[in-house]
Image (spheres, rainbow, N blue to C red):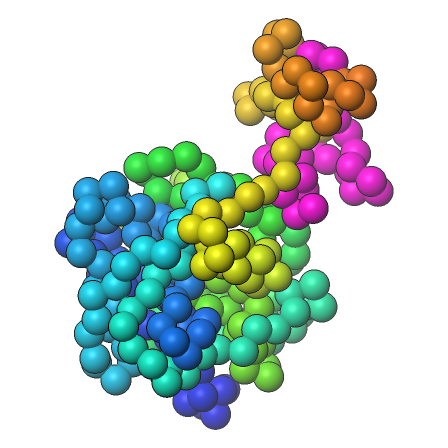
Amino acid sequence: VAGLANRVLPSVVSITTEAGSSGSGFIIDSSGFILTNNHVVEEAALAKAKIIVTLNNGEEFESTIVGRDASYDLAVLKILATGLPALQFGDSDKVAVGDSVIAVGSPLGLTGTVTLGIISAKDRAVTAGGSAGESSFINALQTDAAINPGNSGGPLINTTGAVIGVNSAIATLSGSSNSQAGSIGLGFAIPINQARKTADQLIKNGKATYPVIGVAVDMNYSGDGALIADKTSAILAGGPAAKAGLRPGDVITKIDDLKIHSPEELIVEIRTH
């Protein structure tokens, strides 16, 4: 772990904003592109406030937002620097429950913090995001590596030193993502295969796309499956669901061979396609 941490730490940055939010990020390209969570920079983006990136060696840079996407809770920043040590991408589809991982970031402003754990579960439907905008739905990797406020946007690393996830959310005993609560061993990361795809789109186009089926689901439905809201406007005219013959009031129970138990599971499963 010490050897891994030594290799990875120079690629992990600390992010602070004039809007008061803070978090972590990591270098994905030696020319200065940095990946983080949208909720780390969202308030600063809306307030047009400065976003400061601090490298592991203490150097500070003012950054610009290349693009951000609330639906996946990801953002790409750019700093004017070259020759930076970029992290290697792993393959999050090959991650197995029980694999050892380390989380790196700046929890509670404590820069360069490394914690060790395992992958506790895969494909967890998790809601994340900041208070300023829409919720993000993540098909998350769950880990017991300690993740606290300030770890958001930092990398989850496998035993080869490759990044397999972007640390994004924690569960708390109240059941919400409370920014004041600490780790209880339930941390969640966006799988890197999804994050990489979104980051590439943000760098190329400044925005990212995601798939929809064209239905409004009832988020308060407590039965098994996902209920399409019982009103005519719940089906987008001419959308994929309309063409497939779905109707208001239908309950979706499976996508392909995957059972759907909640509206959140439906949303994250569609977004993995």
Is residue 272 covered in magenta? yes
- Who's the residue at 66% across and 15% down the image? 237
Image-quadrant location for residue 210: top right
Can residue 191 be seen in this snapshot? no
Q: Quadrant of residue 163?
A: bottom right
- Residue at 73 percent across and 18 percent down: it is 242
Figure quadrant of residue 203: bottom left
Choose between 12 and 95: the one closer to the eye. Answer: 12
Residue 226 placement, left or right of 86: right
Residue found at x 25% / y 41% = 46
Residue 143, given in percent of the width and then of the height, sits at 55, 62
Image coordinates of residue 249 in percent, x first then y, are: 70, 12
Taking the image as shown, residue 128 lies to the left or right of residue 10, namely right
Q: Which residues are magenta?
A: 247-273
Residue 233 position within the rendered picture, expressed as x and y whole percent measured from the top left: 59, 11
Q: Is residue 232 left or right of residue 176?
A: right
